Image: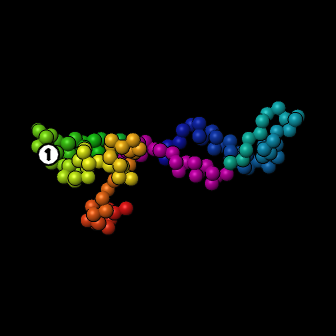
Amino acid sequence: MKQSPKYKSVKSGVLSQLKSPDPKRHSWKSSENDSTPSKPVVSEMTISFINSFRATEQDLSAASSKISRSNDSDIADESSAAVVSDIESVQFPHLNFDFLKPDNIRDADGRLRSHPDYCPRTLYVPEAFMKKQTPGTTL
């Protein structure tokens, strides 16, 4: 894996901290007489962990090739899809349910749209309809 020059200098600085027994370099707080701020000690394990998240040039080129291939397949799927020229000729199953017809729509409490306490955020679904549904779709 390629490492940036910035990383190499940080790593060499960290290694020199680890090798040096100088307590001034290892303290988290700088002393009042010390004009240079102290740096925290970073272990090799920490550096290795951080490096495991770095992307290499190989990772980036592989990712971009996967993206371009996925875009090509999306275009092929769209062109092979059936095109309906007249939307009114399509029959949607929900239009066959009596309780969903505009004149029969009720709220969860069974109130018609004309009722003053009608709640437009709820919908009444008849018990007979619910019993005809498969176990995976019932509430």
The image shows residue 5 at horizontal and vertical percentages of: 57, 37
Q: Is residue 92 magenta?
A: no
Between 137 and 78, the one lying in front of the other is: 137
Judging depth in this view, the residue of 23 and 99 nearest the camera is: 99
Examine the rendering and report whether any part of residue 70 can be seen. yes
Name which quarter of the figure residue 34 lies in: top right
Q: Is residue 94 left or right of residue 120?
A: left
Q: Quick check: 123 above or below 30?
A: below
Say whether residue 123 is left or right of residue 7: left
Q: Kindly identify the residue that appears in the image at 26 percent across and 65 percent down.
A: 132
User: Looking at the image, which residue is at 38% across and 44% down?
Assistant: 118
| Label 1: few (<14), some (14–19) or many (≥20) C-alpha neighbours in 10 Å | few
**Element class at badge 1:** loop
Q: Residue 84 falls in which quadrant of the image?
A: top left
- Position of the C terminus, as image quadrant, is bottom left
Q: Residue furthest front?
A: 115
Residue 65 visible in image: no
The spot of residue 3 in percent (x, y) is 53, 42
Q: Amino acid at mark 1?
A: Val
Q: Residue beneath label 1, please?
A: 90
Please tell me whether residue 62 belongs to the stretch shown in magenta: yes
Tell me what residue is drawn at x 63 percent, y 44 percent.
11
All told, the count of numbered labels is 1
Coloring scheme used: rainbow
Q: Nearer the viewer, residue 71 or 46?
A: 71
The residue at 58%/52% (across/down) is 49
Give the percent coordinates (x, y) of residue 52: 53, 50
- Find the magenta span and give its range: 43-63
* x and y percentages locating residue 45 in the rendered image: 63, 54
